[in-house]
Image (tube, helix red, strand yellow):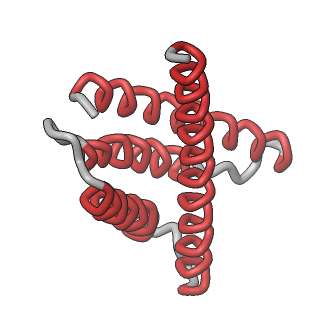
């Protein structure tokens, strides 16, 4: 990944998290009748989105990475994301029970795995399309 791709990914991740946080605040306001809306959760989501978007710099490399090095970088990225997702709400005092921390860790891990699996299938489909075009072009 070049540095421009990293900055584009950082920007889109931040904008996506920002819009999702506003969406969930709106939905919770509609459900609760605009009573008991915690704007601290909005600030937590904003801080989390900024910090998570900056973790993409772990994936930056000037050289092509092999499979093992790329997997190691994705594992480091996962641990950073999980640490940010758990630590920011914890330090903002939004957790009352340890069980909610465990639930957040499990939910975040499953969500990260599903997104990674989805991206892998997209890249696999794109690689197959490119291979098919190359086969038809050089026949």
- What residue is at 46 percent from the left and 45 percent from the top? 43
Closer to the camera in the image, 2 or 124: 124
Q: Position of residue 64 (x, y in %)?
A: 21, 41
- What residue is at 34 percent from the left and 61 percent from the top? 71
Q: Which residue appears farthest toward the top when viewing the image?
A: 137
Q: Position of residue 16 (x, y in %)?
A: 54, 32
Tell whether 77 sits left or right of 134.
left
Q: Is residue 113 above or below residue 99?
A: above
Tell whether 70 sits left or right of 138.
left
Look at the image and tell me in which quarter the C terminus lies: top right
Q: Is residue 67 above or below residue 39?
A: below
Q: Position of residue 138 (x, y in %)?
A: 50, 16
Closer to the camera in the image, 21 or 10: 10
Quadrant of the image occupied by residue 67: bottom left
Closer to the camera in the image, 69 or 82: 69
Q: Which residue appears farthest toward the left when viewing the image?
A: 62
- What residue is at 72 percent from the left and 36 percent from the top? 26
Q: Is residue 59 above or below residue 16?
A: below
Look at the image and tell me in which quarter the N terminus lies: top left
């Amino acid at each position: 990944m070049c540095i421009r791709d990293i900055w584009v990914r950082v920007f889109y991740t931040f904008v996506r998290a920002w819009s999702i946080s506003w969406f969930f605040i709106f939905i919770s306001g509609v459900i609760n009748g605009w009573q008991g809306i915690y704007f601290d959760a909005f600030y937590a989501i904003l801080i989390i989105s900024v910090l998570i978007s900056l973790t993409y710099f772990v994936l930056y490399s000037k050289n092509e990475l092999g499979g093992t090095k790329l997997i190691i970088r994705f594992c480091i990225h996962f641990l950073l994301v999980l640490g940010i997702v758990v630590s920011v709400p914890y330090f903002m005092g939004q957790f009352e029970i340890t069980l909610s921390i465990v639930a957040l860790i499990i939910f975040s891990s499953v969500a990260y795995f599903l997104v990674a699996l989805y991206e892998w299938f997209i890249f696999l489909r794109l690689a197959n399309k490119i291979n098919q075009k190359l086969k038809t072009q050089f026949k």
